Amino acid sequence: MCADTFGVAIHVTDSELRLLVRVPSEIDPGWTDPETFQSLVANVVWDQLNREPVLSAIATDRDPGDTVSLGTVTLETDGTVLDHDLDPVE
């Protein structure tokens, strides 16, 4: 089974914070539904990082248009987390 590494960031707009999942240019064909891997990545991020303090720090310290990298998550197509390199925003 192959694994893919997804970049994860938070984008700040005037009205919201958006979780961005950056997809590699060549992705395993086993990922047939983008919503599936985006949900899996989001779940890993919030399992590893405390959502409220991270989002609060970004909302307080960043301006609209900023994108704050949180790191990467490596998943197999069955949802197995192989690795993550996530950094809580302070």
Image (cartoon, rainbow, N blue to C red):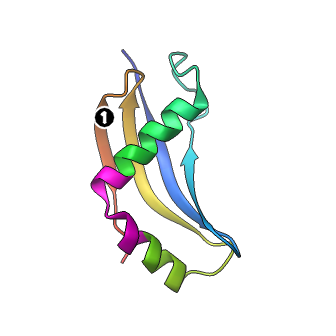
Quick check: 36 left or right of 54? right
**Which residues, given as a range, are shown in magenta?**
46-54
Query: Where does the image place residue 44, in percent across and percent down from the top left?
Result: 35, 45
Work out whether 43 lies above or below 78.
below
The stretch drawn in magenta includes residue 48 = yes
Query: Where does the image place residue 68, in percent across and percent down from the top left?
Result: 52, 67
Name the residue at 49% across, 62% down: 69
Crowding at mark 1 (Cα within 10 Å: few <14, some 14-19, many 20+): some
The stretch drawn in magenta includes residue 47 = yes
Query: Where does the image place residue 73, in percent across and percent down from the top left?
Result: 39, 43
Quick check: 60 left or right of 85? right
The residue carrying mark 1 is 81
Work out whether 71 lies above or below 3.
below
Name the residue at 43% across, 37% down: 40
Instruction: Label 1: state its secondary structure.
Output: strand
Query: Where does the image place residue 23, in percent across and percent down from the top left?
Result: 57, 38
Amino acid at pointer 1: Val
Quadrant of the rendered image containing residue 15: bottom right
Magenta stretch, main secondary structure, is helix
